[in-house]
Amino acid sequence: MNPKSGEPMLQLLSPEGVYSVEKEFTRYGSIIDSLTEAQLKTLYRDMARIRRFDQEAIALQRQGQLGLWVPAIGQEAAQIGSGYAVGKNDHIFPSYREHGVAITHGVELISILKMMRGVNHGGWNPEETRFHLYAIVLGTQVLHAVGYAMGVKLDGRVGTGNPEEDLAVISYFGDGATAEGDVSEALLFAAVNESPIMFFIQNNQWAISANIDSQTKVPLYRRGEGFGVPGLRVDGNDVLACYAATKYHMDQIRSGSGPYLLEALTYRIGAHTTSDDPTKYRSEEEVEIWKARDPIKRYEVFLRRQGVEDSFFDEVAVAGDKLAEEIREQIFALGRPPLEHIFDNVYSDPHPEIEKQKAWLRAYEDQMGSHE
Amino acid sequence: MSNYRELAIAKAINAGLQRAMQKDSKVLMFGEDVAELGGVFRVTEGLLSEFGPSRIFNTPIAESAIVGTAIGLAMRGYRPVVEIQFDGFVYPAFDQITTQLAKLTYRSEGFLSMPVVIRIPYGGGIGAVEHHSESPEAYFAHTAGLRVVTPSNPNDAYWMIQQSIDSNDPVIFLEPKRRYWQKGPVNLDIPPMPLHNARLLREGSQVTLLAYGPMVSTSLQAAEIGQEEGFSIEVIDIRSLSPIDYPTLFASAQKTGRVVIAHEAPTNVSISSEIASRIAEQNFYSLEAPVLRVGGFDTPYPPAKLEEEYLPDADRILEAIDRVMAY
């Protein structure tokens, strides 16, 4: 799919790295105009950081250190741009490929790797990070996000005008998940409850081997219309457009305008997961077209035009290698989880049957001497 | 002195919900037609006028969303109580219940609790059309992370709904719909026992009869007839289907040596399969006869004109009692 295929789309940075604001989009442009050089650099630094991390994770999987990896290469602008636009009280409900969004909210990268190594199923505190747990069953988290947003509204934390009080919710999901009934139900519930929620679709155009054209007959930014949720398509490889659109509409939602939908049109450069083989279902030519629209390269061109010097980019590259080294050390240091983790936290309140089984397994293992 | 009120099961649940909502402003009630109408069985009648539309509200007809948004509200600190209109309509929410609600505490390593109650009117005997008479309890009892309970009388209904709302874990609360109008005394001051205890209802020495929900009154009736025929039958209301109060069940099995289990659900891979196997495993030398089960057949729930033959009644239970007594 060509992003300029006749559908309106917010783009502030062309694939060649040229910044321009069309007249109808000035409200988004003015958000970018207010960013400081330090903020602009942060967007680059984190896009580069998450890509380096991603490459390292693929290598770790190939070396047998991870059971699986879910690459997000190509989607850095959609994730870092939108992630930084999420406000300090807002809550994020991700799918399972939102590693970039995670780092904008203080989730440790090693926490994500733990899941992929089989150490745990999640395990960060969603209240503390406001970045909720990864959801592997597609679309399920979108309903949780709407429920959370319903609660925010019941709490009277929308449209008070006090930025310390107000908050909104954003749920991430992909083009593949839009087919799930849960997503349609979430749009409906959000609309009828006028919930403070943003539906953020990363359309990376491939749901494993199924192309977007086989999944929708109407562009996804219009998916909410019939439910009463307006939407906008954004160039998902343009970090400035993703930041500006998310920031503008999250501000609106926080002030009580009701749900909104953003479709970030991007491309999954890598495989669905390390178990996938995209050469079986898509052409190398198509991938090459999208590599030419790389979100990081175009943003580097833009920053250099803004006068950012070589030393910054060198420093980011060095930091990336250092991150990779740290990640490797952390992975190797991860032990095996204690046996009790099979049984812990199945319930919040005491449960006699689980306790009995836990005691039995401990005694059995001690007798056999087989664990650890 | 405790205060008592004579209430039907439906009214007792209503009163329990009312009290829970009065005690804790975080308790919310929502589902299909629960507000103005008070639900198709009127279990939530009157709550809207007392608590207003921010505490009890109707939702669109989307069961997955009813449970999915309840999960999100629980994450926000609420204690949602949701109604699934009929047993046969819970399946659209099955994914949210089993992959999400049941597992989020585990997935989050205890950072999240899921105090969500899902109320489901269940069971047959009301002459209904398809999908309105099912007994889906085994699906939920099989799922780690859920608790499953079912009251059989007004006093338990009143207290067990409140105890379920107090639970920090998700509770599937199964309401025996054909007994909704069965009346009995409700002690408004003192809860009868913890949520997950089984109750000895009638003492006997020869056979233990285990039942839950709508089959409890049928079992008591069978025990009465059995006594006239000279059998001493002990009746236990299981009450909690996950976890099951095995110590109470085992004590009775050891005393009588003979056990019959009755429920409406098909017996294949059911609550009674599990109880029979546990009783055999852990009480082998006390048993005088194999554990027998009386339940629905392994068919879909039949058309209403045949449900009298499908559902276990006192005679079918007594036929099983005759068989265990023959050993």
Image (tube, coloured by chain):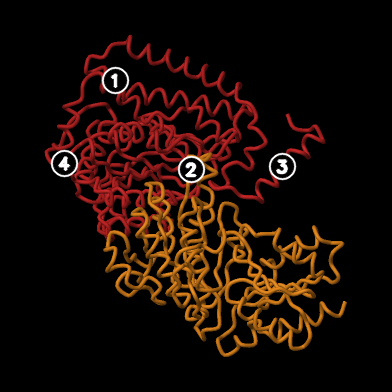
Chain colours: A red, B orange
Q: Which of marks 2 and 4 is in front?
A: 4
**Marks 1 and 4, Cα distance to the nearest angstrom?**
30 Å
Asked if badges 1 and 3 are on one and the same chain, I answer: yes
Q: Which mark is first along the chain, 4 or 2?
A: 4
Dots 1 and 2 on the same chain: yes
Q: What is the three-letter code of the residue carrying label 1?
A: Lys
Q: Secondary structure under badge 2? A: loop
Q: Which chain carries label 2?
A: A
Label 3 crowding class (10 Å Cα cut-off): few <14, some 14-19, many 20+?
few
Q: Which residue is tagged 1?
A: A41
Residue plotted at (36% across, 39% down): A266
Tell me: A291 left or right of A354.
Answer: left
> Alpha carbon of mark 1 to alpha carbon of mark 2: how far?
34 Å
Q: How far apart are marks 1 and 3 (CA)?
A: 54 Å
Residue A282's mark? 2
- Mark 1 surroundings within 10 Å by alpha-carbon count, few (fewer than 14), some (14 through 19), many (20 or more): some
Chain letter, disc 1 residue:
A
Location of residue A258 with respect to A227 vertically, above or below: above
